[in-house]
Every structure is written in C-alpha cells, then in structure tokens.
Amino acid sequence: MYAFVSNEYRAVVKTQRQLDFLMSIYTYPQFRKVNNELEAKKFFNSCNRDFMKTGLNKYGRPNDIGFIKIEYFINGKNIYVNVFTKNFGFIKLSDLPSNVKQDSSYDLLKLKICNVILDDSLIAHHCIAIVNILSLFDSYINVELVVPDISIYLACTKYNGKNYAIKRMQGALSDRMGSVFYTMK
C-alpha cells in the first residue's frame, strides 16, 4: 500500500501498477510505502500541496512567452475555438478553408469550424477536433492545448492502441516543430 501525492491528486494506492500509472501522469509526484490509512493521512498532512489550484497549467510549459493557448468546444455540427494570444502577439489567420469563420481582437482569436459533425462524449471525436484545429496554425508555433478531461490528455500523451483517429492526432502532435503542452479544464 502506498500514499501518493501530486499537485493535482492524492490517494491511497494498493498496487505498484496503479502507483506507476499515477507517477506517469501527474506533476511533481511523491509517494511513501505505508501500512495503513492512518500512516497515509500523516503523510498527506506532511506534504504541503495546493490540490487542484494549479492543475496542469504549467505542465510542460518552458516559459510564459511565445505560445498560443487553444481552448475548444464541440457542439453538434460545429467546433468553437478560442485562441488566446496574450503570450504570442496579435494574429489573424489567412487562407482559411471556407467552413472556418474567424473574429480577431488584440489578445483573442475566435474561430468557428462549421459543418464538422462530432460527438462531444467520444474521445476519438475530440482527437478529430484537435487535428482540425492544429491544421489551421503553422507547425512551428508553440501551443498550450486546453483539454476537457484526463481521458483526452491520456489519448494525446499515453495511448498506444490502434484507434485511427487517436493515432492520427498523435502523429499531428509529434510532427509539429513547436512544442505542445496541456492544461485540463
């Protein structure tokens, strides 16, 4: 039995496999082998962490300049995208496909990718949305991608199965010259 603590999560873990998994996905993890839950609680109290306040916001980001932050929403036939450019500078996209509408301001670019029928509850459809969004930007731009939950994050970073949509997205992410890092909502 292990007591596990990270910036985002803490738990009593029963197996080494669970511990290895948690160590691979959470930031700044610590653990201690414990005999019971009372020892685990003492370990939790000794670790001064602000749980769920920072999330993965800084995870993987090398610095606070030179990147765009992309947040997206799937709604039936459209993908809505907010591109925060505060850390990059003013941008406006040109040569867009006919199904993409944009509205730009100083530090925000709003995009609507029309007529892409996706289901918000499917991981593969989120992967398709991410590929569509990233195709609009040059590959050298550093991107902070805001994903809706841990399952999308794991699909981006840890998945090793055969699903075509997920593998295609992983290929699009790895082919980028710029860095991609993640934040969860």
Image: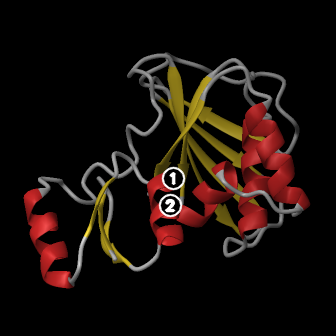
Q: Give the residue at mark 2.
A: 20
Residue placed most toward the observer, 2 or 121:
2
Which residue does the image show at 77% across and 45% down from the upper left?
A: 170
* Residue under the point 24% across and 54% down: 53
Amino acid carrying label 1: it is Ser
Asked if the residue at tag 2 contacts the one at tag 1, i.e. Cβ–Cβ closer than 8 Å, the answer is yes
**Any part of residue 73 in sight:** no
As displayed, is residue 146 above or below residue 40?
above
Residue 116: x, y in percent? Answer: 83, 59
Q: Locate residue 72 relative to residue 24 in the image: left or right.
A: right
* Residue 106 - label: none
**Residue 31 image point, x, y percent:** 30, 59
Reading the image, the residue beneath label 1 is 24
Crowdedness near tag 2: few (<14), some (14–19) or many (≥20) residues, C-alpha within 10 Å: few
Seen at 45% across and 65% down, the residue is 19
Q: Position of residue 151 (x, y in %)?
A: 60, 65
User: Is residue 64 depicted above or below 23 in this figure?
Assistant: above
Residue under the image location 40 percent in, 21 percent down: 63
The residue carrying pointer 1 sits among few (fewer than 14), some (14 to 19) or many (20 or more) residues within 10 Å by Cα, namely: few
The image position of residue 108, as x and y in percent, is 49, 33
Which secondary structure lies at badge 2? Answer: helix
Q: Is disc 1 placed on a helix, strand or loop?
A: helix
* Front one among 73 and 157: 157
Regarding residue 78, the answer to whether it shows in the image is yes
Q: Amino acid at mark 2?
A: Asp
| Quadrant that contains the N terminus | bottom left
Q: Is residue 140 left or right of residue 116?
A: left
Q: Quadrant of the C terminus?
A: bottom left
Q: CA distance from mark 1 to mark 2?
A: 6 Å
Q: Please name which of the two marks, 1 or 2, marks the residue nearer to the observer.
A: 2
